[in-house]
Image (tube, rainbow, N blue to C red):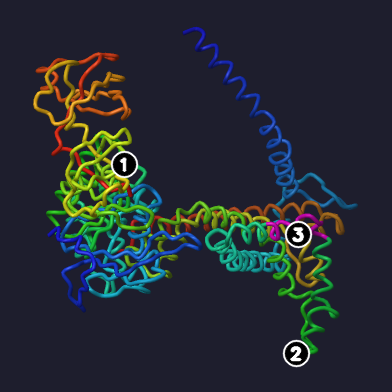
Amino acid sequence: MGQTGERGIDVQTQATSDFDIEFRGVTKRFGAVTAVQSMDLQVARGGFFSFLGPSGCGKTTSLRMIAGFEQPSEGDVLIEGRSVVGTPAHRRPVNMVFQHYALFPHLDVFDNVAYGLRQRRPRPDRDTIRRQVGEALELVRLSGFEGRRSWELSGGQQQRVALARALVNRPTVLLLDEPLAALDRKLRRDMQIELQTLQRDVGITFVLVTHDQEEALSMSDTICIMRDGRIVQMGGARELYDEPANAYVADFVGKSNFIAGTARAGGGLRDPHGRGFGGRRPAGGRALGEGEKAVLAVRPETVAILPDGAASGGFDVALAGRIRNRIFLGEHTEYLVAVEGIGDMLALVPKLAEEERGSFGEGQAVTIAWNDRSALVLGDD
Amino acid sequence: MADGTAIERRQSRVTAMLLLPTTLWFLLLLVMPLAVVLVFSFGERAPAGGYEAAFTLEQYANLPARLTAFTNTLTLAPLGTALCVIIAYPLAYYLAVRAGARVKLMLLVLVIVPFWTSFLIRTYAWIYILGGRGIPRLLDMVGIEDLRLINTPTAVLIGIVYGYLPLMVFPIYVSLEKLDKRLLEASDDLGATPLRTFLQVTLPLSMPGLVTGSLLVFILLMGEYLIPALLGGGKVFFVGNALVDLFLQSRNWPFGSAVAIALVVIMLVAIAAYLALVGRERTRSDASLI
């Protein structure tokens, strides 16, 4: 599980494959616009896979090519090792949960969920349909809602009906297109947990599309970060967070402070003022040559704020700064610190640290500090 | 609190004033004439024509004398409506679902353009097209001889479809336009073939437009006068033509009134039956065919 990201491997599989979904050199063009650019991808069986990226990065197009709503302009899409190029959506063993659910308004909950079963030939008998629909509704905790119409349901309930309607068909892969985007924050958190639990219970491969990094990080085994129709990096949540391949990923996954400069041959970075910063290269990252444009990325939670003039307390880097802004967020406080020659840097100070070192007011002169091991030198691409 | 009730009272007064024209229109132009016609239908023809007060069912007993007009109306009006549905639905579907923005605009304009000239003139044009020097002559050239169109039920049907098609296209178009295209993708995704998607999603969701269009066309066709008069030549006549004849030619107002009342009653029964059928069909497909 989670063993993806092995790009460039020529998998000689026929009818059976370890992968539920494979893209081989897939390109999709809409007129002059290239939505997906020669993409290679493998989605392992039984995992929770996410496409993550801003709008227009090609993630939805990728999902729609799996569903069968779009056909690739070039390359091959495989489901369970079989090419499905040219196969219409209704003949593919995948089902989709649509962004705004797309529940049939003229049918009640039962008929919505039964819809897929009734398309089967030979058609299952009445009792089979009733039992399977009942099980699917139980799975999403909506038993007793059979007779309701979609407009009588809350957003979260509609979401669950959409899930049941797809899962009842026992698809090889369940596709989810921004499934939580229409829900409010609290409900979204609940549904994230619910989706994850559900995926483990049913053992079906889930492929999610989202622009919400928190959603992708919290639920997926493997996340595929996309930009401009290409894969930027693929890996687990922790890997992407701790070892981002470049500045784009470091910026997209979580928050980062960036210091622009050039790479140093011995490691680390030199900023335009000639100051040197220590930092490590991410595992699996591209090698950087001396003088190449690079950034130093420091996560805000690894940045400490010390009273001005205090001992640097064993930190590798200590810079003078002034508090520009302070936002209290409960479990921690977000400080924006103006640092000379760098600009504004963000620091997340947990409650505990604040209790020990005291809090700081706006305009106060402080020292901002971090350790070289928390800093990453990343290519600026 | 007092202010609140004052505002409420003023609002209800405004509402009443806004409703007044409609109410007056309804009473003066619909209820009153209908009441007059109803009273007339129980009367007798005055010797010089017109109406003479009486209470007799004689006019109603005499209705079979105009049976042909009723049978013509009751066959050609539903048939014309059905033809309009069959032709309008694919067109509306194409306009709403398939056509690109420019083609759509052009076709919609083409559907509307005929309304810019008088219906009478356009129907006169059809007399020429269907007449001896029109289509039959063209067919004659390719070897199909002696085809008569003008003054036949076919001519009347052609005129009906020509005249009433836009009234059918627009309601269906509107209901298909509102149809969420993602529902079609959802159906496709759930394993339905394109045909089944059409039958199970598109058609049920466009039923409101189809019902509206059908009622609109059917009701207007039941009272149709012009098309049978011009294209049916005195041979294919509707109840509407019979009414013109009775009121203007033979000046038999009471009998004309009875015919008119009979038409209204038949229409109401037909519409009620149609709506009941459509309603039952819908609830059955709703409760569904497990």
Choose mark 2 or mark 3, whichever is in front. 3
Q: Residues within 10 Å of mark 2 (few under 14, many from 20)?
A: few
The mark nearer the N terminus, 2 or 3, is: 3
Secondary structure mostly seen in magenta is helix
The residue under label 3 is: B114
The relative height of residue A257 versus residue B100 in the rendered view (above or below) is above
Residue B77 lies in what quarter of the image?
A: bottom right
User: What type is the residue that disc 1 sits on?
Assistant: Gly
User: What type is the residue that disc 3 sits on?
Assistant: Pro
User: What type is the residue that disc 2 sits on?
Assistant: Ile
Q: Which residues are magenta?
A: B109-120
Q: CA distance from mark 2 to mark 3?
A: 30 Å
Evaluate whether residue A143 shows in this view: no
Are the numbered discs 1 and 2 placed on the same chain, yes or no? Answer: no
Q: Residues within 10 Å of mark 1 (few under 14, many from 20)?
A: some
The residue under label 1 is: A155
Q: Extreme right residue here?
A: B48
Tell me the subunit letter for badge 1: A
The residue at 62%/64% (across/down) is B81
Point out which mark residue B144 bears.
Answer: 2
Q: Is residue B258 magenta?
A: no
